[in-house]
């Protein structure tokens, strides 16, 4: 009896997870994550201890805890997005063309499982694992920040879910590139796209600080063209959206400030963008000779 | 009589304007073992890949049990071993077959896996990691994988290229057993002796066209009568078995002493070389 697409997809996801466990991918990720969080805890400890010597804090102009907490936690969000993106890319690296060139894909594709089901299963596996990863590490970083500096972001879950959606979008882009490009080119291009998105976001941040309309426009266009950047920036904004006064202004102008909030349009666009990229990937895969 | 298991009609395929298949017709019926021969680049692998839905044809049709090649029912009815394949090295033989059972919807369970591994001589290696297996073992595992779910059509692309003589014998026996079970087999191979030994029919492809087809007996026709007399060995070219008694009678009547008579047949290799015109890929 031909298995249903859902069952076939579950088989492919389970196979990918088992591969990650057996190849010790998850173990390596766990070790590196513990190392990252340890370093973060150490950094947070010293930042909260030494921020009292900061000029603005001494003068009572700045809320030193909010300043230190938002900055260090913003840095953590940047690192978590990067780690999540690395995980998403490696879980989809060579998923189609690379596996086809090495002969891994053909024995699976000739089974009754459709190509679209196969592709969506690979996406679901990568997006779920990398999305869950960023949420867990984000919450761990939050706990560390709270314990070391007694500071909490103004919004806790929104930025975490935004990060999860951002890495899911990166997984979708990576999967599309895996259909079109050989493995090495896929890896290079997806990380260049990732870097370009973050650079555009920083430009927008600078544009906001110096009141440059052109830079601000570049940032907005980049946020819509590569919505993972928009979601990240919106997450940074949400961390301090309730912080008022000079502290709020200084934080918003900083590198981990986030000048734009995530409206419902950005969230809707991010989902539509992800589905569009997946549809393109499925179309390209269906037309590819293996 | 039931229809063909595999029906290829007017099949064409072009890669960026270069013709790989130029109108091939071929049928395979249940229990029939057909050998597909041809030089490298002749289009054998392309034909096989179109039959299992990996490659889209440029024209013509391919049906598996009456369903278009590449459709889910067609894929569910076939087993395939590619010429260049790789299985995940971290998997054991048993795990790989279990994965393919789940994807094929096979309910055979552990019993089917054991039977298949025993069939290809890997019964002792069921828990061995694939990355620790020799290329020959992996090829036999590939054949077992292709047999998961009891396919009605088996498409094997160079399945014995990495096998030693013992491995080849195992596969030969397996193919004969599958024929007995009514499985239709398309065997792509460069090993003419192998094809000659097991195949019911042979199809030779060159430059994307089917240039010769028939049973090994039909293809390997008479190539003359060889007679050894006191004067040495003489060959009566173009003569067949029916003419041998007359030739001997005439020689004896002419006073010659005949020591040995042999009706010569052209080998499949001769037929192949003639059909492909010395082409090599």
Image (cartoon, coloured by chain):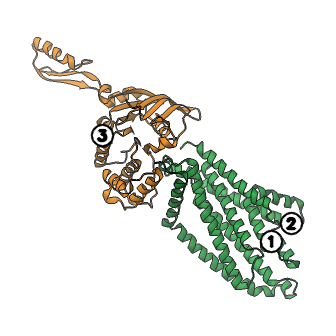
Q: Nearer the viewer, residue B54 or B261?
A: B54
Image x and y of residue A69, in percent: 76, 80
Residue positioned 75% across, 57% down in the render: A268
Q: CA distance from mark 2 to mark 1?
A: 10 Å
Please tell me whether residue A169 is drawn above or below residue B205 in the rendered image. Answer: below
Q: Quadrant of residue B184?
A: top left
Q: CA distance from mark 1 to mark 3?
A: 74 Å
Please tell me whether residue B215 is drawn above or below residue A184 in the rendered image. Answer: above
Circles 2 and 3 in contact, beta carbons < 8 Å: no
Image x and y of residue A122, in percent: 57, 56
Image x and y of residue A208, in percent: 86, 66
Residue, disc 1: A257
Would residue A266 be found to the left or right of residue B125 on screen? right
Q: Is residue B110 visible?
A: yes
Would residue A245 be found to the left or right of residue A264 on screen? right
Secondary-structure class at tag 3: helix
Please tell me whether residue A256 is drawn above or below residue A112 in the rendered image. Answer: below
Residue, disc 3: B180
Q: Colour of chain A?
A: green
Residue, disc 2: A208
Q: Which chain is orange?
A: B
Are there few (<14), some (14-19), or many (20+) residues within 10 Å of tag 3? few
Q: Nearer the viewer, residue B215 or B70?
A: B70
Secondary-structure class at tag 1: loop
Circles 2 and 1 in contact, beta carbons < 8 Å: yes
To the question of a shared chain for discs 2 and 1, the answer is yes
Give me the chain letter of mark 2.
Answer: A
Give me the chain letter of mark 1.
Answer: A
Q: Is residue A226 visible?
A: no
Secondary-structure class at tag 2: helix
Residue positioned 40% across, 42% down in the render: B158
Are there few (<14), some (14-19), or many (20+) residues within 10 Å of tag 1? many
């Amino acid at each position: 009896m031909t298995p249903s697409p859902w069952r076939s997809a579950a088989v492919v996801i389970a196979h990918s997870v088992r591969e990650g466990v057996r190849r010790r991918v998850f173990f390596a990720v766990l070790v590196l994550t513990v190392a990252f969080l340890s370093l973060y805890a150490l950094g947070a400890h010293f930042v909260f201890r030494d921020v009292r010597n900061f000029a603005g804090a001494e003068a009572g102009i700045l809320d030193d805890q909010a300043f230190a907490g938002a900055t260090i936690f913003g840095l953590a969000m940047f690192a978590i997005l990067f780690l999540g993106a690395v995980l998403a890319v490696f879980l989809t690296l060579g998923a189609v063309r690379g596996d086809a060139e090495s002969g891994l894909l053909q024995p699976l594709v000739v089974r009754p499982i459709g190509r679209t089901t196969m592709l969506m299963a690979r996406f679901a596996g990568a997006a779920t694992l990398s999305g869950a990863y960023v949420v867990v590490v984000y919450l761990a970083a939050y706990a560390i920040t709270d314990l070391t500096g007694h500071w909490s972001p103004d919004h806790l879950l929104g930025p975490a879910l935004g990060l999860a959606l951002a890495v899911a979008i990166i997984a979708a882009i990576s999967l599309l590139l895996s259909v079109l490009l050989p493995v090495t080119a896929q890896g290079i291009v997806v990380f260049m796209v990732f870097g370009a998105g973050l650079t555009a976001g920083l430009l927008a941040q600078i544009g906001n600080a110096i009141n440059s309309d052109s830079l601000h426009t570049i940032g907005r266009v980049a946020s819509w063209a590569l919505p993972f950047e928009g979601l990240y920036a919106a997450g940074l904004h949400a961390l301090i959206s309730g912080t008022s006064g000079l502290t709020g202004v200084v934080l918003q102008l900083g590198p981990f400030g986030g000048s734009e909030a995530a409206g419902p349009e950005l969230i809707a666009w991010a989902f539509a963008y992800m589905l569009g990229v997946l549809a393109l990937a499925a179309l390209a895969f269906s037309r590819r000779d293996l | 009589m039931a229809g063909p298991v595999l029906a290829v009609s007017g099949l064409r395929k072009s890669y960026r304007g270069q013709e790989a298949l130029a109108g091939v017709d071929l049928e395979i019926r249940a229990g029939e073992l057909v050998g597909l021969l041809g030089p490298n680049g002749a289009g054998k692998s392309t034909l096989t890949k179109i039959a299992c839905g990996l490659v889209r044809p440029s024209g013509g049709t391919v049906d598996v049990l009456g369903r278009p090649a590449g459709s889910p029912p067609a894929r569910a009815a076939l087993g395939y071993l590619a010429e260049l394949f790789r299985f995940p090295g971290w998997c054991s033989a048993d795990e790989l077959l279990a994965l393919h059972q789940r994807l094929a919807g096979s309910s055979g369970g552990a019993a089917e896996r054991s039977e298949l591994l025993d069939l290809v001589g890997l019964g002792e290696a069921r828990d061995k990691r694939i990355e620790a297996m020799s290329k020959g073992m992996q090829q036999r595992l590939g054949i077992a994988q292709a047999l998961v779910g009891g396919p009605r059509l088996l498409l094997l692309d160079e399945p014995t290229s990495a096998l030693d003589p013992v491995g080849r014998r195992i596969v030969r026996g397996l193919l004969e057993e599958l024929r007995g079970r009514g499985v239709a087999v398309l065997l792509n191979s460069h090993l003419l002796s192998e094809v000659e030994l097991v195949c019911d029919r042979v199809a030779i492809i060159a430059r994307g066209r089917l240039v010769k087809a028939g049973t090994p007996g039909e293809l390997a026709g008479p190539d003359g009568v060889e007679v050894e007399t006191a004067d040495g060995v003489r060959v009566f070219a173009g003569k067949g078995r029916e003419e041998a008694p007359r030739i001997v009678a005439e020689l004896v009547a002419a006073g010659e002493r005949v020591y040995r008579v042999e009706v010569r047949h052209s080998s499949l290799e001769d037929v192949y070389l003639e059909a492909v015109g010395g082409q090599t890929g």
